[in-house]
Image: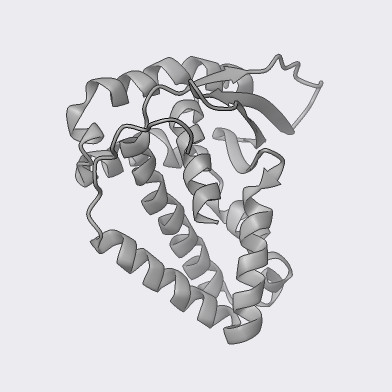
């Protein structure tokens, strides 16, 4: 799970769209137009490269969070148990799942080196409100990694609600883990586990990653 999430977050570092513009560009265009800007920020900011958590969180908050539907992601990850959760539990689940992904995402900024992203040709189906954008993350000296973004059209622009890396869905991956935890300790038990993980992550300082040598 940890390797899956870190890889996913590393991909997002190079591919998450910026704020939706008034004309609401098509989702593949958003990704293409964002790659250079996001990578430029990371390449030029030595504080981010060194693991400055405050600056990283500020960057994530400004450039990443507005473009995810965390409520839908959480609902999909919790699965059938979502229907039995109280409104308060649902809000807690969304908040803690969001925090979990955000805290993990910050680590991707310190392990970034020279990855690039290729967006595959895409044609928008007429009237489409949900699409899948196919991309490939290219890491010199390593195998290319296919990444598919599942995105939905909302009043605020296109938002990601799931993605798959090498055919493995992020939401499905978490759903299996969450299901086991709910069966063992209920929804409150899952919330407690997420809270504890986020507390640990918040207290752990980020460290600058050492240059990679060869494979992962």
Quarter-of-image position of residue 178: bottom right
Name the spot of residue 59 as percent of width and height, x first: 31, 36
Is any atom of residue 183 visible in this view? yes
Q: Nearer the viewer, residue 84 or 39?
A: 39
| Rendered view: 80 above or below 150 | below
| Quarter of the image where the N terminus is located | bottom right
> Within the image, what quadrant is residue 95 found in?
bottom left
Q: Residue at x 40, y 71 (%)?
A: 195
Can residue 21 be seen here? The reply is no
Residue at 30 percent of width and 26 percent of height: 42
Task: Give the answer, above or below, for where 106 lies relative to 115.
Answer: below
Residue 115, placed above or below residue 99: above
Asked if residue 33 lies left or right of residue 84, the reply is left
Q: Can you name the residue that lies furthest to the bottom here?
A: 185
Residue shown at 25% from the left, 49% from the top: 206
For residue 149, side relative to residue 98 (left or right): right
The way the protein has been coloured in the rendering is one colour
């Amino acid at each position: 799970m940890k390797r899956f999430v870190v890889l996913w977050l590393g991909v997002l570092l190079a591919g998450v769209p910026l704020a939706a513009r008034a004309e609401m560009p098509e989702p593949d265009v958003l990704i293409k137009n964002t790659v250079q800007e996001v990578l430029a920020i990371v390449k030029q900011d030595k504080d981010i490269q060194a693991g400055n958590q405050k600056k990283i969180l500020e960057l994530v908050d400004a450039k990443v969070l507005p473009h995810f539907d965390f409520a839908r992601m959480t609902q999909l990850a919790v699965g059938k148990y979502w229907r039995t959760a109280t409104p308060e539990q649902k809000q807690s689940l969304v908040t803690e799942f969001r925090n979990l992904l955000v805290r993990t995402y910050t680590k991707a900024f310190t392990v970034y080196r020279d990855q690039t992203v290729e967006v595959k040709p895409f044609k928008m189906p007429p009237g489409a409100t949900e699409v899948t954008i196919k991309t490939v993350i290219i890491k010199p000296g390593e195998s290319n990694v296919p990444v598919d973004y599942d995105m939905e059209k909302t009043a605020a622009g296109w938002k990601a609600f799931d993605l798959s890396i090498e055919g493995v869905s992020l939401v499905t991956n978490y759903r299996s883990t969450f299901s086991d935890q709910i069966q063992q300790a209920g929804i409150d038990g899952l919330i407690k586990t997420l809270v504890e993980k986020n507390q640990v992550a918040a207290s752990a300082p980020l460290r600058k990653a050492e240059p990679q040598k060869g494979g992962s």
